[in-house]
Amino acid sequence: MPSAHGFDLGYIWKPSPKILLNMAYWYLFLEQEFVYVGDAGIVEPSGETARQGVDLSCRYQPTSWMFFNLDANYTHARSINDPEGENYIPLAPDFTLVGGLNLLLNSGLHGNINVRHLANRPANEDSSIEAEGYSIIDLNFGHNWKTINLGIQIQNLLNTEWNETQFATESRLRDEVNPVEEIHFTPGTPFFIKGMIQYNF
């Protein structure tokens, strides 16, 4: 079984009773990277890889009813034995971010707005094809009583067009002489509203 070796070094700092910060540097070596092949529906080995990155987290509570959270990650991921410029790890994220603002009032009203961001990333080994990133905003709000919670969930508030699953795959149309490698994708969820009724007992 291929081995994996890693370490991380970081700190947790609470500069005030209302703020919590966490930052860490990490490194991960994989003796064997396994890559999904969409056409064949299999996973194949692709050699040794190394990843390193920085994680940052922040929690802030300015009032008794307001909470803020932020998590960000930057990663440098490369194959070890391939030539420079042809050593990208397909679909390995470079930068991700998740953040939100949450409200919880004594009256029972509650709500939150959240953003999730994924930057563009290489879709093949030489980065000649990119998987498109996205920034999506979700909104939730509702009211709590003793035993009942009513809420509304709005996904993709700004109706952003985005791709969820993406792979660089070879395909050939009937009128094409040679196959073409390009992005095949599953569309992400469009603007969507969902109601919720929850009963606690």
Image (tube, rainbow, N blue to C red):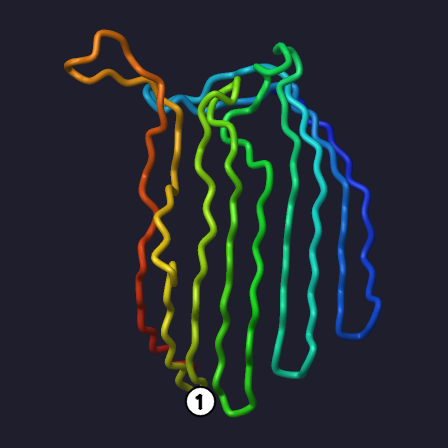
Residue 195, position as x, y percentages in the image: 31, 73
In this orientation, which residue lies closer to the viewer: 62 or 14?
62
Q: Is residue 112 left or right of residue 179?
A: right
Residue 53, position as x, y percentages in the image: 70, 37
Q: Is residue 148 left or right of residue 79?
A: left
Q: How many marks?
A: 1
Q: Amino acid at mark 1?
A: Trp
The residue most toward the left is: 174
Residue 49, position as x, y percentages in the image: 64, 21
Quarter of the picture holding the N terminus: top right
Quarter of the picture holding the C terminus: bottom left
- Residue 166 vs 151, above or below: the answer is above
Q: Is residue 49 left or right of residue 145?
A: right
Please tell me which residue is depicted at 49% across the width and 88% down the height of the picture: 108
Q: Could you tell me which secondary element the residue under label 1 belongs to?
A: loop
Residue 71, position as x, y percentages in the image: 63, 54
Q: Which residue is mark 1?
A: 145
Q: Is residue 12 left or right of residue 71?
A: right
The residue most toward the bottom is: 107
Q: Bin the neighbour count of mark 1 within 10 Å (Cα to Cα): few under 14, some 14-19, many 20 and up.
A: few
- Residue 149 vs 169, above or below: the answer is below
Please tell me which residue is depicted at 41% across the width and 82% down the height of the picture: 149
